[in-house]
Amino acid sequence: MNDSAEQPTYNYLTAGDTVKSWLLTVDHKRIGVLYLIAMTCFFLVGGTAAGLFRLELATHNPDVLSNDTYNKLFTMHGIIMVFFFLIPAVPGVLGNFLVPLMIGAKDVAFPRLNLASWYIYMLGGSFTLLAVLLGGIDTGWTFYTPYSSVYADSNVILAGTGVFITGFSSILTGLNFIVTIHKMRAPGMTWMRLPLFIWAQYATSIINILGTPVIAITLLLVVFERAFGFGIFDPARGGDPVLYQHLFWFYSHPAVYIMILPGFGVVSEVLACCSRKRIYGYEFVAFSSLAIAAIGFFVWGHHMFTSSQSEYAALIFSVLTYLVGIPTAIKIFNWTATLYKGSIELSAPMIYTLGFIGLFLVGGLTGLFLATMAVNVHLHDTYFVVAHFHYVMVGGMMMAWLAGLHFWWPKMFGKMYNEFWARIGAVVIFFGFNFTFFPQFIAGYMGMPRRYHVYAPEYQPFQMLSTTGAFFMGIGLLICMVTLISSLFKKGYCGRNPFKATGLEWNQAASPPNTHNFTAPVVVDVEAYDYTDERIYQDA
């Protein structure tokens, strides 16, 4: 990999480097970097909260935190990680940076709307952080009623307003991506030549537009009931708390795919590059993203097997939940087939990608247990659910996010990180994650309920293992952060295509890209992932 190439003469980083030029930019690449900075800050806040309550859970007695503080910390961790990191991470950073580059466009369809979406995201985050600073929220990230709308003695209105506002950022970003992908593709960039990352962003954008208004209105109703005493969800006022669960999970289960579908797109790109092969069954992988987006809207009821939902409705939701596993399995099988007889390079992005496949596979298979009604009744609200969720979202989404960040970091900033330390960080994160969450499957199966920090002594060995694993995972994340940030201070620039990858962003744009992405009109004349094309090796 070339670390001594000359700096591009005119790129998006150097084209006006004042604070004002960044805050008023309409360049999609700079907006992606702004998202990266903001999300890193939110991640640190949410991760610090997790570290504090994980320290408390190391013993079965309340040694560090009070009941109220513990409730507020795990609520803050959930709200910040779900709504301000996991959901917008890949679309906000990698999506904004890469979608126009990958399809041969100069920018997104609505550049000013793109900037507005970042400001809306920051405004919503400010409301939520203000709620934390003024005393916190103790409802859990699900805001379950009637506790959240009537009884909670915390800043539910501020936090709910923050999440409500942030939803508009997701909607506007999704709208922008859909229009951009439909209308601004370069000549020759047909639908069947689109990178799979674009297919994943397209499917995610559909879910964002259709699902996010539901959660926004639902939280607005919670605020109205709490502020004005409306009888919407409170049974004492004629409301229905189960209605809240239907509305909340109608969005929040598709939200799982908002988080994970972009990660699927990242995995496809890295896997193809690091195995030097076209993705096996490209068409099936592409359309499976749309199938996941569609079926995902019909499975929310599996979160409510222990509510007043009828057993007949629960049966239908159980079957549909099994059904959504089919397009997901298609991706796993096709990725595995892609690896077969591939020329595999275990770079840092590839290690994260392989870690993603293993961890997500565990998360997906344990989801089948929870989709089974009889088993779900036993495991509902136990640490088994916590472990399953984190294997999908953290083991899956975060590993994919880190894979994508390491893969496109040289393209974003023109600097190559230290590969040795990047690999070390990936391995430490992988093992730290498994030590953190795998013991929780066992504790949950034994019956340990979640959201309790005072628990029976027989569960302490599992919680001690989890706390130790979280410590090592934190070390791995620190290694990752130091490795990436330190690369920015290296002398010299990497070449246009250090990973020898296909794609317009690698072969038609500089590293870092020019302000308007390309110096000449782009015409696409090859299919995606054509690793027999010698042009990809000319400037690596």
Image (cartoon, rainbow, N blue to C red):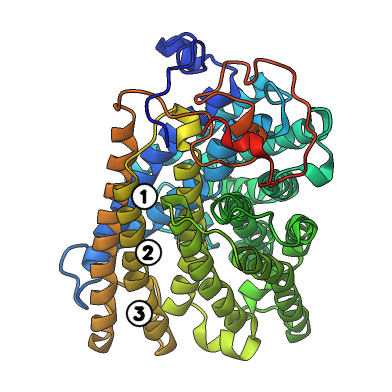
Residue 522 sits in quarter: top right
Residue 444: where, in percent of width, then height? 42, 83
- Mark 3, secondary structure of its residue: helix
Name the amino acid, label 2.
Phe
User: Which residue does the image show at 70% across and 44% down from the upper left?
Assistant: 195
Which of the 4 quarters of the picture holds residue 138? bottom left
Q: Which of pointers 1 and 2 lies earlier in the amino acid sequence?
A: 1
Q: Position of residue 228 (x, y in %)?
A: 58, 45
In this rendering, position of residue 472 left or right of residue 352: left
Residue 244 locus on image (x, y percent): 64, 61
At 42% from the left and 81% from the top, the residue drawn is 441
Mark sitting on residue 46: 1
The residues tagged by marks 3 and 2 sit, at their Cα atoms, a distance apart of: 15 Å
Give above or below for 523 relative to 288: above
Q: Which mark is residue 430?
A: 2
| Label 1 residue SS | helix
Q: Is residue 142 left or right of residue 322?
A: left
On the rendered structure, is 326 left or right of 5? right
Q: Which residue is mark 3?
A: 439
Q: Nearer the viewer, mark 1 or mark 2?
A: 2
| Label located before the other in sequence (3 or 1) | 1
Q: CA distance from mark 1 to mark 2?
A: 19 Å
Q: Residues within 10 Å of mark 2 (few under 14, many from 20)?
A: many
The crowding category of the residue bearing disc 3, from other C-alpha atoms within 10 Å (few below 14, some 14 to 19, many at least 20), is: many
Mark 1 Cα-neighbour bin, 10 Å: few <14, some 14–19, many ≥20? many
Looking at the image, do the residues carrying marks 1 and 2 touch, with CB atoms under 8 Å apart?
Answer: no
- Residue at x 42% of width, y 23% of height: 5
* Three-letter residue code for mark 1: Gly
Is residue 153 at least partly visible in the picture?
Answer: no
